Structure formats: C-alpha cells, structure tokens
Amino acid sequence: MTLFYSVKFSLKTTTPRALDVKVSPLVFCFREGALELLEPVDERELAASDNVLFDKKFGDTIRVTYVDLVSGEYVAKVLTYSVPEEAKLVIELIKSEGDIERRYVLLYAKRDSSYERVLSTPLSDLALREIARVASVCYEVLKPLTKY
C-alpha cells in the first residue's frame, strides 16, 4: 500500500484577510475500471512541518495558505489514506464552504512510491471530461464526482 495525505480544516481569521471557511476532502482511487472512495486510516493534528503539504493543496486552489491558517483560529487534521498498490491514479475532491464556496478536483499519478499532482481544476462537467482524457479513463466513471 502507498500512503496519500490530505488535510481537513476550519478557519476563522481577520488577518491578513477576513475569512471563515471549512474545507473537507474526499479521496478516491481508480482501479479495475472503477472509482473507489477511500476512507482515512489515520488522523492527526496538523503540525508546522506540514506547511508545504498544506500550501501545495490549498495555496493555488482555494487560495488559503499555511500563514493564513496560523494567523487565525483553526482546527486542522492531516488525514492518511492507504492506496492499493494497483491504483495508478488518485483523485482528491476538495470542498470548501463558508466565505469560499468551491469544489476542486485534483488528479495525482503514481510516481515511484508516492503520488504527484498532474492536474488541478475547479469541479465541472468539462473539467471531468479533461481529467478523463488526461487519465485515459472513461468519463462515465468520473461523472459521479459531480454529486459531491
């Protein structure tokens, strides 16, 4: 099994900008022609050493950085997922609520013993078609992501 990490958090801050947001991820793997929802196998408090992980996931998607997070009142957890070895793709759906209402889909491809982001885009039907093309998977398999 290969480990994959995500972050869920809630944040209220006025510095450097007013923000009240709650973010939660859903993580899927693609294997045997199907999309499979993964459940976290571990959860821990976000640490200062997780700043790069946080910024990579949220800095260019919902535009919240680690500095934004620690400048306010927050609760943040790092979620660990165990991805089956035969899964070559991981899809992470990030849903934010509150002042930032967005859904982003991030596509990761397996590289050696980890996953590297290949594509990041706001969730839409057109985006899922592009992900299907890039990942060489059937669009119909990805279409259920629009219900989240």
Image (spheres, grey):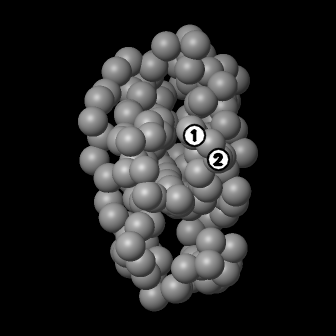
Compare residues 131 and 102 and report the one nearer the observer.
131
- Residue 132: % across, % down: 60, 78
Q: Which mark is residue 111?
A: 2
| Residue at figure coordinates x 38%, y 34% from the top left | 80
State the residue position of label 1. 114
Task: Answer whether labels 1 and 2 touch (C-beta < 8 Å).
Answer: yes
Q: Secondary structure at mark 2?
A: strand
| Residue at figure coordinates x 38%, y 18% from the top left | 45
Disc 2 residue type (three-letter) = Arg
Label 2 CA crowd tier, 10 Å (few <14, some 14–19, many 20+): few
Q: Secondary structure at mark 1?
A: strand
Q: Is residue 3 visible?
A: yes
- Residue 26: % across, % down: 39, 53
Q: Is residue 59 above or below residue 84?
A: above
Report the quarter where the N terminus lies. top left
Disc 1 residue type (three-letter) = Ser
Report the quarter where the C terminus lies. bottom left
Q: Is residue 49 above or below residue 36?
A: above
Label 1 CA crowd tier, 10 Å (few <14, some 14–19, many 20+): few
Q: Is residue 83 above or below residue 68?
A: below
| Residue at figure coordinates x 59%, y 30% from the top left | 54
Q: Disc 1 and disc 2: Cα gap in Å?
A: 6 Å
Q: Is residue 10 visible?
A: no
| Residue at figure coordinates x 55%, y 79% from the top left | 137
